[in-house]
Structures are given as structure tokens and as C-alpha cells.
Image (tube, rainbow, N blue to C red):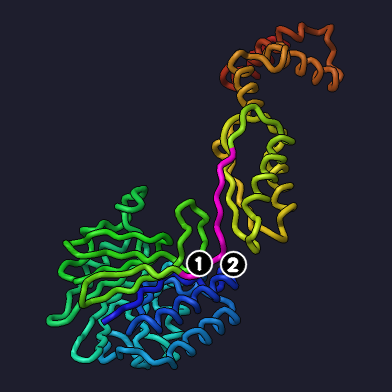
Amino acid sequence: MKIAIVSDLHLGYDTFRNDAFNQAMQALDMANELADAVLIPGDVFDRHYPKPDVIAEGINLFRNLSKKRWGAEVIEVNGTHAFTDVPIVAIPGNHETTVQNSENPLTLLALAGLLIDTSHAHTVLQKGSEKVAIYGFGSIAESSAKQKLSELQPKPISGVFNIFMFHQTMYELMPFNENFMRMNDLPSNFDLYICGHMHNFYEETVHGKKLIIPGSTVLTQLNDIEKRKGFIIFDTESYSYEFIEINSRPFLIETIEFKDADDIQILSKCIDEIDKLAKGHEKPIIKIHLKGSASIMNYSLLIQKLKLKYAESIYLSIDASQLTDKSIDKNLEELRDNRIGEMPIKQLGNALFIQKLNDLEFDFSLTDANTLYELLSQEESKEKAVKKSREFLNI
């Protein structure tokens, strides 16, 4: 049996809403042509509570898909309601999961008979004499995933090809939170493991079998490796797969290096490079990394100028995290030397203190203002400084 794995459609994604719908439709239509069934490991929708018109997009998309001919059919669903035998099998992702016992948008598609929601349940597909069972584990809080798996104890069905489909972050791929699930936490003895959630393609090995993450069908995170969009066709007979790329908006990345550049030089160079990258593309996504050293008066203003210039023709992202601002370095150096410009910080503070006393019409004949400043500035505790100053002033 050939199984299409299409994940993270994110229907209703605000930034590229049309892209999300069109690319989901493209992927699912191609899946219908190339595969006997389709599995969706989460995030059909981008939000827990999508707007009615976004839900309508999902209904239209899957209604058309469910009317097409498929090589396999659903013959058994254990643990959940099934209102179709069309082999479109899905689980909710973290973008869809709602509060406990509350229906999520994926459930609505299942209740309408447009797909099978196989969360915490087995769904069995058949093509000829071959059977494939899918156990689904819909997204839950990362801190609860291991405990929930331990309670459910998913087990494969004897005599069939078994797939474990889930939607969680894997610690081995994103090792920055101890709560994330590990590969070894996944139930053993399944023939194939499928995961959604992460938007780039990955292949790993779990319990001696393949773990496949197809990535999303729409660009969302704008990281440097999120370029190819598509889905997987997995052949259960040969135990092999193919990544099928879909057409998506061009995503172009460029790094521009500077040495002691000012605002005008940076702006001019960015415009030159952006124009070169955008040539021949219709409203591409362009990400610019700025590196090196510069003296910039206002980062946000510079970036805003660039985004306004290309607002109608380019989706522009600017990363200036690797650009060192020389003016900041100069200010830090002055602070390390206890000065601002040519004036020592202490002297500047004293001058401002005296100016403030002048504003308050302080009678300088009563005491020495410089000594009073010393008393106020030497003590670490505000209370002690006030106490000594009051004693000095006899008040």
C-alpha cells in the first residue's frame, strides 16, 4: 500500500493564507493521484477556533478530496466514531487542540464525515489483502505527553502493518526543554512512526524503524532550512519513501556583510541586493542577514524604511542580530572608563544635581552643594543616604 503523509497545512495562517490553502489543495490532490490513502499528523488548521470562512475552506477542501477514488478504504475504527470509509486519517495538532472535552476544528471535519480523527484510537485500512493499522496520538501539553502515553500503552495489531502517528516535539531534534518527549518514550514494535509539528523534513530511527517528519506544506517560520515544501509517499511493500515537492512561494536568503558602515551605506547595499534577489520572482519571501560592524542611529527606522519600500512586492524579513553597532561599543567603552563623551560620569552627575537644586531655588548659602552630592552618591542604600544628608543639613 502507498501511504501519503501530508502534515501541518495550517489553513487560515494569516501571513500567507492563500498559500496555505492552495498548497494544501495541491499536496492533497497529488497525494490522491500517487497514493492509496493519506495520513495527516496534525495542524490542518492554524488556530484552535478558526473563523467560519476558514472552516468553510477546510470543508470544501476535504469534501472534494473525499469524493475522489482511493485505492484503500477504512474497514475498522476502534475507539472513536467514524462517519466515512474514505482513507483520509488525521489527528489534531497543537494549533487545533482545545480544552479537555471540547470539540476542536478537526473533530468537526470528522463529524461531517470528511475524514477520520484517530486520536487515541486505531484505524485500519485495507487494499486488496493488505491491511494497515494507524494508531493516533493527538497533540497534548509537552509536560503530559510521556505520562499520557504510559497510561494509553498503544500496541500494534497483530498481522498488519502498524503505524504510530503523533504530533509532539522530539527532544533529540529540539533539545532545549527537558519536558519534550524522547525517541525511546515512543511505543515499541510499530513498523513506522510518523510525526507532525516540526515544519522541516526529518528522518530518524526509533526502535529500529523509520521515524518520518514530512514538514509543513506552507512556509511559516522563515528559518534558513525551511525551503522545500511537500509531502511523503511511503510504500509499505518496499519499506521506502519519496519526498514529493510542491510549488510554493520562492524563499530567498542572503547574508550581507559590512565594515564600519553607516545607515545610508547599509540601506543602499540592502536595496541593491534585494533588487537582485527579487528579479524574476512574483512577491517572493526574502530574508536578509546583516553581519559585521556599523554605526546606526536607529535600527528600527532603517528596517521600517526597507519594509515600506517593498511592502507591495516582497515579504521581507531582516535579521540584524549579527551586526555589531560601533556606537553601542563606543558608549560601553565610555561607561567602562566612567565617562560620557569627554566628561567623567561623576562630574556630569554633580553638574546635573546642582542644576536640579537651582530649579528648586535651593539656597546655596546654607551648605556646600558638592559635599551634599558626595553624601547622596556614596551610600549604597537610599535610606542611609537620605539620613546622612538630613543630618548634614540639620533637618
The residue wearing badge 2 is 16
Quadrant assignment, res 251: bottom right
Q: Position of residue 263 (x, y in %)?
A: 72, 35
Residue 92 place in picture, x, y as percent: 40, 74
What residue is drawn where x is 80% and y is 21%? Answer: 356
Query: Of 167 and 393, which appears nearest the observer?
Result: 167
Q: Residue at x 32, y 89 (%)?
A: 71
Q: Position of residue 355 (x, y in %)?
A: 81, 18
Camera-nearest residue between 20 and 379: 20
Quarter of image, res 139: bottom left
Question: Gap between marks 2 and 1, in whole Å?
Answer: 8 Å
State yes or no: residue 252 in magenta: yes
Whether the residues at callouts 2 and 1 have beta carbons within 8 Å, the answer is yes
Q: Residue furthest left?
A: 158
Q: Could you tell whether 387 is left or right of 204 in the image?
A: right
Whether residue 378 is situated above or below residue 276 in the rendered picture: above
Query: In terms of sequence position, does the residue under pointer 2 or pointer 1 come before the other?
Result: 2
Q: Which residue is mark 1?
A: 218
Identify the image quadrant of residue 281: bottom right
Image-based side of 355 in relation to 15, left or right: right
**What segment is highlighted magenta in the picture?**
246-256
Which element carries disc 1, helix, strand or loop?
Answer: loop
Q: Identify whether 23 is placed above or below 75.
A: above
Q: Give the residue at x 60% y 53%.
A: 286
